[in-house]
Image (spheres, rainbow, N blue to C red):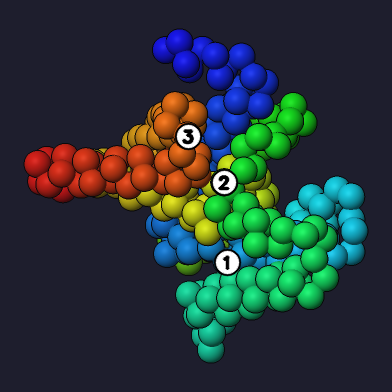
């Protein structure tokens, strides 16, 4: 506790704790929708697109790369959604194509025109978020707070419509719901959350924040609402504990959070088997 209190005196540690909890909350809420729609690996695709966009922004010497990364990632989310509905190219193939292509282009550009002398270190930090924790600022916390309010408000205001679109798009469309508009909304918000999550866990681990809490909750509960609340709770606990343990053990925060989420999944699977689910 003494060591933890010492580190919490630093602002960037407090920022990392707050940002980690808020990003995990948003990722878990969106993860329930994406997992049920069989689109959980969109996190991988969009995070790799964001990596490529960051590389392009670095080569172009753009001061604030988020101004460039956000629109590119949102556009990629819309393209993935539209392409995934194509009968010739299924969703998983579209995600694989875009994610691998963006990753290759990003690494190629960084090696071709490096912005710093330590290209390997920059790539490692972006992919795994190993050193991003110490670069968090008050603006990052504010942005994550705004994003969390938007995601929570989206679920509160459009809960029934999201429920209908998630489980049966044809039925929702027959009742007059603008299914495409709601899908676009979820895709755009997911893209923004993934870009923010890359600062904490990196582009290669960001899908874990989306997948594991949702799957863990589904092992224990059957109702949509219960799964949402359980997924959010597990994600928040995992993120807070992961950041704290990474401080005490000097481990990468992203990897620590993901390992805890994996542990929660195995425990919830045992509980679900005990409950007969």
- Answer whether residue 165 is visible to the viewer in this image: no
| Residue 103 falls in image quadrant | bottom right
Residue 128, how many percent across, how many down?
A: 55, 53
Query: Which numbered marker is on residue 45?
Result: 1
Residue at mark 2 to residue at mark 3: CA–CA distance: 11 Å
At horizontal 74% and vertical 27% (from top left) the residue drawn is 138
Q: Is residue 55 visible?
A: yes
N-terminal of the two: label 2 or label 3? 2
- For mark 3, what is the residue? 250
Instruction: Specify few, some or many for label 1: CA neighbours under 10 Å numbering under 14, 14-19, or 20 or more.
Output: many
Q: Quadrant of residue 15?
A: top right
Crowding at label 2, few (<14), some or many (≥20) Cα neighbours within 10 Å? Answer: many
Q: Secondary structure at mark 3?
A: loop
Residue at 50% from the left image edge and 39% from the top image edge: 253
Residue 115: percent from the left, percent from the top? 82, 60
User: SS for tag 2?
Assistant: loop
Query: Which labelled disc corresponds to residue 59?
Result: none
Compute the Cα span from label 3 to label 1.
29 Å
Residue underneath mark 2: 130
Q: Are marks 3 and 1 in contact (CB under 8 Å)?
A: no
Rendered view: 268 above or below 142: below
Residue 154 versus residue 163 in the image, above or below: above
Q: Nearer the viewer, residue 249 or 198?
A: 249
Picture residue at 9% right of the left edge, 41% below the top: 274
Q: Secondary structure at mark 1?
A: helix
Task: Say left or right for 150 vs 166.
Answer: right
């Amino acid at each position: 506790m003494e060591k933890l209190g010492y580190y919490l005196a630093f602002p960037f540690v407090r920022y990392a704790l707050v940002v980690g909890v808020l990003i995990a909350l948003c990722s878990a809420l969106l993860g329930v929708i994406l997992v049920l729609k069989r689109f959980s690996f969109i996190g991988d695709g969009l995070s790799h697109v964001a990596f490529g966009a960051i590389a392009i922004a670095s080569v172009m010497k753009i001061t604030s790369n988020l101004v460039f990364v956000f629109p590119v990632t949102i556009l990629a989310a819309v393209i993935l959604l539209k392409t995934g509905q194509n009968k010739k190219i299924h969703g998983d193939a579209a995600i694989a194509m875009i994610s691998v292509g963006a990753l290759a282009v990003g690494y190629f550009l960084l090696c071709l025109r490096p912005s710093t002398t330590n290209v390997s270190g920059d790539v490692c930090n972006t992919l795994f978020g190993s050193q991003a924790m110490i670069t968090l600022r008050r603006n990052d916390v504010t942005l994550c707070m705004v994003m969390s309010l938007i995601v929570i408000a989206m679920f509160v205001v459009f809960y029934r419509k999201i429920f209908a679109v998630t489980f049966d798009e044809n039925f929702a469309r027959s009742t007059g719901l603008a299914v495409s508009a709601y899908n676009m909304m979820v895709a755009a918000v997911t893209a923004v959350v993934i870009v923010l999550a890359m600062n904490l866990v990196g582009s290669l681990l960001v899908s874990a924040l989306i997948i594991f809490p949702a799957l863990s909750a589904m092992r224990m509960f059957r109702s949509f609402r219960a799964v949402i609340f359980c997924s959010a709770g597990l994600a928040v606990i995992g993120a807070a504990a992961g950041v704290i343990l990474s401080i005490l053990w000097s481990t990468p925060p992203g990897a620590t959070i993901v390992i805890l989420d994996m542990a929660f999944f195995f425990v919830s699977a045992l509980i679900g088997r005990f409950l007969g689910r």
